[in-house]
Amino acid sequence: MQPSESRMISMMQPHEDAGENANWEAAERIWNSAFPSDYRWFMEIYGLGAIENCLAILAPDGVVSSDAPDSGMLEETENARGVFYGDGATGGPIEAAEQIICWGVDSGSDLLCWLSDSGDPDRWPVLVWDRASGNWTVYECGMVEFLCKVFAGEFDECPLSVADIWQCERPRFVHWRLERSRRQDGLDPVTGEPEEWANP
């Protein structure tokens, strides 16, 4: 286990029955690319779901459980590339929109991506589009390290336009199956406590 992965476990404990048995060969065929090893680890341990009901972690569509909801990775990647095209951006770290692959979206509609500027996915930095400012920012770390640094507040400022997981000492991840089960039972998807609307 890599240091950032150990740190992630210590900061955000995965709950029972989290994680995916993803078909990475299928994902690579669909995307014509491999995926970073820390992201594959995250999918194995945590899976498709949300952190603090604020940040949705996306999975390659059609490669996890057949009853899983559509995560929107393809759609959000197209959105991110569309933003790049719409901005008419040239130069800088992004040479082509096709280098952008989205792995997360937050409640402020910020897009968390990779800049796939290398043939080695483990060298892809995190690329964030901040909806509030309209800026693209590159962070020279992988997805898991990036999340740990957000949780610990280790960047000069919050990389996201919403601060729900910024300096969050004990963030909670909820897998899509647990979220579905809790919602069916009238429970808050994050806390597991009864929703106010369910018990008037």
Image (cartoon, rainbow, N blue to C red):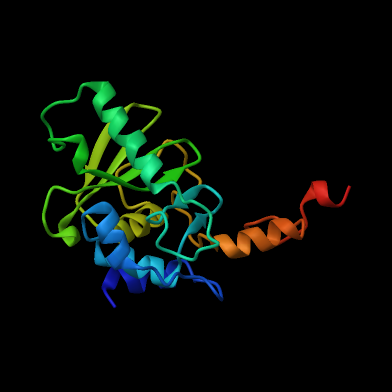
Q: Quadrant of residue 36?
A: bottom left
- Residue 183 in the image: x percent, y percent? 70, 56
Q: Nearer the viewer, residue 190 or 43?
A: 43
Q: Residue at x 49, y 66 (%)?
A: 65
Q: Nearer the viewer, residue 186 or 10?
A: 186
Total number of numbered discs in the rendering: 0
Residue 28 visible? yes
Q: Quadrant of residue 57?
A: bottom left
- Residue 135 in the image: x percent, y percent? 29, 30
Q: Residue at x 46, y 70 (%)?
A: 19
- Residue 149 in the image: x percent, y percent? 34, 56
Say whether residue 103 is left or right of residue 19. Answer: left
Q: Residue at x 21, y 35 (%)?
A: 97
- Residue 90 in the image: x percent, y percent? 14, 26
Say whether residue 119 is left or right of residue 54. Answer: left
Q: Is residue 178 above or below residue 94?
A: below
Q: Nearer the viewer, residue 122 or 29?
A: 29
Q: Nearer the viewer, residue 184 or 197?
A: 184
Q: Is residue 95 above or below residue 112?
A: above
